[in-house]
Image (spheres, rainbow, N blue to C red):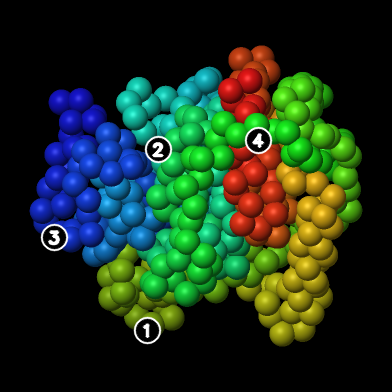
């Protein structure tokens, strides 16, 4: 049986089993004919959800995430779950107790993370497919760039997080990936918009983003942030990105240099905030309510530690320890509150830039997808440093799209387009023009 046939069967069974009144009819709706894969930190009723962690093994959510419900309502088939770094903690999708996904362009290289499975499947699916994914600090843009697909991280609050297994609540965003800009715009149009189940969603209804794909670039002001082309960016990557920026210019955009002066400190601010929030979110996994359980021996503390020791991977444990430390009385001011103040400065950088330009254009990642043997030699902090170009827009909560902009030694390079809050329209306009050439 072909994967698509078995997915259809599973989906039909789930529909019957779950009495999904809200589900649309397959074959009718904006996503009819599409298979939708779902990152494993989003709940699909009746399908195991691990968020890439052993601690959730055996957990089968009794409900659909809102983004999933909305895809079903537009006639999509839910294909299955895609692998990820444990709870989203990673940049290469190697921090997982499950299978590590391989880059479709070179199996010795990583897919990028944390939405690695989503990107690899999007790049290689030979059938109509779009992916639901999530970003906290770059987890959609990074793997989209490394695998050569379009990755959309919407404005914070644009898409409901009902049914998302949290990493860091002030940063998490549900988004999507697709092979083309048009399909990505379509998917965002389906999943975006207010949701009574998530009070943090922005009230405004979602427009039809597909109408912006194909609009001309006349009058569009594109900013090139100088801090994003500096040291550490592979010259080959910078070259492909510059070629794309020039193309935007030749298509009618006006290009100018801008500055995001707090780029250098955004990385440490992001990791302090993300780890502080993650360490509180992970406190709920006690081996009692759902997921992994152990033999009920000893007192609560012993039980709690033994289940958590067995269930969490090394990176999750590192983040629990670092995040707890950053929140401790006595260190709170020095780390967590300082990181929040830096975040305010980073937001200010973007707000200032968007007074001068409509869209920012930069490399998504400083390098192409690294090989697994190269990754094995990196220290944890070197993993974190790979996020240097993606964390700032994620801290600011502005929308971003990574769009393929050429190849370097047979590997894809991503152009990162960023816009002001709620201006996804501008991103689809620019990405669409670039794709059309
Ligand atoms: N690489 C970043 C981290 O490990 C971002 C991950 C994400 O967006 N989920 O935190």
Q: Looking at the image, which is closer to me, 190 or 214?
A: 214
Q: Which percent across, then down, holds residue 267? A: 75, 54
Q: Kindly indicate whether the residue at mark 1 contacts the one at mark 2 (C-beta within 8 angstroms).
A: no
What's the CA distance linking mark 3 and mark 1? 41 Å
Q: Kindly identify which residue carries mark 3.
A: 19
- Say which quadrant the N terminus sits in: top left
Nearer the N terminus, badge 4 or badge 2? Answer: 2
Answer few, some or many: residues within 10 Å of disc 3's Cα (few below 14, many 20 plus, some between 14 and 19): few
Q: Looking at the image, which is closer to me, 73 or 230?
A: 73
The correct choice, above or below, for 229 with respect to 249 in the image is below
The correct choice, above or below, for 218 with respect to 75 in the image is above
User: Which image quadrant for residue 314?
Assistant: bottom right
- Say which quadrant the C terminus sits in: top right
Answer few, some or many: residues within 10 Å of disc 4's Cα (few below 14, many 20 plus, some between 14 and 19): many
Q: Which percent across, then down, holds residue 179? A: 47, 29
Residue 84 seen from this side: no
The answer to whether residue 154 is left or right of residue 406 is left
Q: Residue at x 65, y 44 (%)?
A: 426
Q: Secondary structure at mark 2?
A: strand
Q: Kindly identify which residue carries mark 2.
A: 130
- Is label 1 within 8 A of ligand 1 (CB to nearest ligand atom)? no
Nearer the N terminus, badge 3 or badge 1? Answer: 3
Q: Which percent across, then down, holds residue 375? A: 63, 35
Q: Kindly indicate whether the residue at mark 3 contacts the one at mark 2 (C-beta within 8 angstroms).
A: no
Q: Kindly identify which residue carries mark 4.
A: 430
Q: Kindly indicate whether the residue at mark 2 contacts the one at mark 4 (C-beta within 8 angstroms).
A: no
Residue 396 seen from this side: yes
What's the CA distance linking mark 4 and mark 3? 41 Å
């Amino acid at each position: 049986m072909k994967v698509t046939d078995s997915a259809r069967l599973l989906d039909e069974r789930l529909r019957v089993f779950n009495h999904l009144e809200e589900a649309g009819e397959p074959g009718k709706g904006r996503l009819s004919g599409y298979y939708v894969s779902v990152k494993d930190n989003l709940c699909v009723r009746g399908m195991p959800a691990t968020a890439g962690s052993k601690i959730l093994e055996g957990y089968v959510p009794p409900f659909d995430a809102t983004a999933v419900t909305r895809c079903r309502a537009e006639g999509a088939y839910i294909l299955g779950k895609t692998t990820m770094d444990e709870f989203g903690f990673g940049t290469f999708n190697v921090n997982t107790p499950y299978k590590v996904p391989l880059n479709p362009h070179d199996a010795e290289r990583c897919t990028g993370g944390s939405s690695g499975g989503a990107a690899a499947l999007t790049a290689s699916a030979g059938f109509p497919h779009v992916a639901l994914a999530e970003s906290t600090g770059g987890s959609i843009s990074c793997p989209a760039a490394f695998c050569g697909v379009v990755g959309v991280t919407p404005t914070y609050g644009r898409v409901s997080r009902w049914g998302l297994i949290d990493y860091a609540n002030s940063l998490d965003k549900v988004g999507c990936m697709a092979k083309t800009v048009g399909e990505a715009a379509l998917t965002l149009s389906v999943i975006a918009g207010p949701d009574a189940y998530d009070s943090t969603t922005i009230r405004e209804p979602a427009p039809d983003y597909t109408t912006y794909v194909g609009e001309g670039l006349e009058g569009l002001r594109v900013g090139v942030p100088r801090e994003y082309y500096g040291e550490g960016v592979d010259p080959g990557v910078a070259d492909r990105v510059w070629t794309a920026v020039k193309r935007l210019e030749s298509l009618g955009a006006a290009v100018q240099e801008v500055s995001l002066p707090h780029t250098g400190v955004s990385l440490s601010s992001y990791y302090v905030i993300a780890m502080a929030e993650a360490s509180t979110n992970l406190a709920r996994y006690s081996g009692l309510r759902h997921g992994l359980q152990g033999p009920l021996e000893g007192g609560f503390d012993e039980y709690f530690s033994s289940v958590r020791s067995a269930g969490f991977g090394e990176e999750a444990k590192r983040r629990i320890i670092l995040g707890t430390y950053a929140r401790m009385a006595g260190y709170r001011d020095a780390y967590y509150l300082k990181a929040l103040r830096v975040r305010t400065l980073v937001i200010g950088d973007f707000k200032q830039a968007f007074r001068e330009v409509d869209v920012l254009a930069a490399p998504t990642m400083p390098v192409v997808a690294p090989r697994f043997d190269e990754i094995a030699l990196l220290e944890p902090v070197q993993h974190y440093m790979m996020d240097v170009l993606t964390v700032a827009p994620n801290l600011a909560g502005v929308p971003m799209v990574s769009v393929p902009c050429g190849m370097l030694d047979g590997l894809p390079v991503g152009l990162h387009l960023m816009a002001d809050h709620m201006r996804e329209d501008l991103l689809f306009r620019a990405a669409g023009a670039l794709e059309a050439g």
